[in-house]
Amino acid sequence: MNPAEDVSALLVRASAGDRQCEARLFEVVYGELRRIAAAQLRKERPDHTLQGSALVNEAYLRLFGRRPATFVNRAHFFSIAASTMRRILIDHARARHAEKRQSPLGHAASDGQLLVDHDADRLLAVDAALRRLAEWDARQAKVVELRFFGGLTVEETADALGISSKTVKRDWSLARAWLHTQIEGPVHVVG
């Protein structure tokens, strides 16, 4: 059995409630989940309080907590895992943002705190823009989520979404340009 088939078979059995398969699945996918978490955390500030292993564990608990989710295949699982990690990071940023608003020191904190506030604000701005993109073009938003937050390659993204690599590249390019204008504002050419 090749690794992709092994993961798919374990997913089916774990989704059906087989706790032994769930434990084995965690062992099999842990390295890939760590890679996805590392890709997401590279985009965060260097002193982020959420570590890669904590992000992986929290995502796995959300995926298999009370009722295990149903996954179609390996690509679908990693797609959902990347989305779950994104939501965890957004929740974490919102909590940090709320702490900042409640802090009596506010913006008078150290330079490091200003950087942390800026990073949380930026992540929330990216999330808001990505939600707007999803209303306009859900597939492009999913491509961004998988590539940017999930760290998936073009080919992995194509496999997860059931589309061609060429379509992923086109969507990725268009979505990045659109998101840039939403976050940074329109580019004005003088000349």
Image: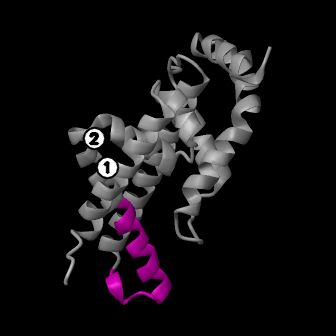
Judged from the image, the secondary structure of the residue bearing numbered disc 1 is helix
22 vs 45, left or right, is right
| Image x and y of residue 48, in percent | 56, 66
Q: Disc 2 marks which amino acid? A: Ala
Q: Quadrant of residue 38?
A: bottom right
Q: Residues within 10 Å of mark 2 (few under 14, many from 20)?
A: some
Query: Within the magenta stretch, is there residue 10?
Result: no
Range of magenta residues: 104-124
Which numbered dot is residue 82? none
Q: Which residue is mark 2?
A: 134
Q: Tell me the SS state at disc 2.
A: helix
CB contact under 8 Å: marks 1 and 2: yes
Amino acid on which disc 1 is placed = Leu
- Residue beneath the point at 50% across and 35% down: 165
Q: Position of residue 34 (x, y in %)?
A: 68, 46
Q: Is residue 65 above or below residue 168?
A: above
Q: Residue at x 58, y 10 (%)?
A: 16
Q: Is residue 99 visible?
A: yes
Residue assigned mark 1: 130
Dividing the picture into quadrants, the one containing residue 25 is top right
28 in relation to 119, above or below: above
**81 over 113 or under it: above or below:** above
Residue at the image position 39 percent from the left and 43 percent from the top: 170
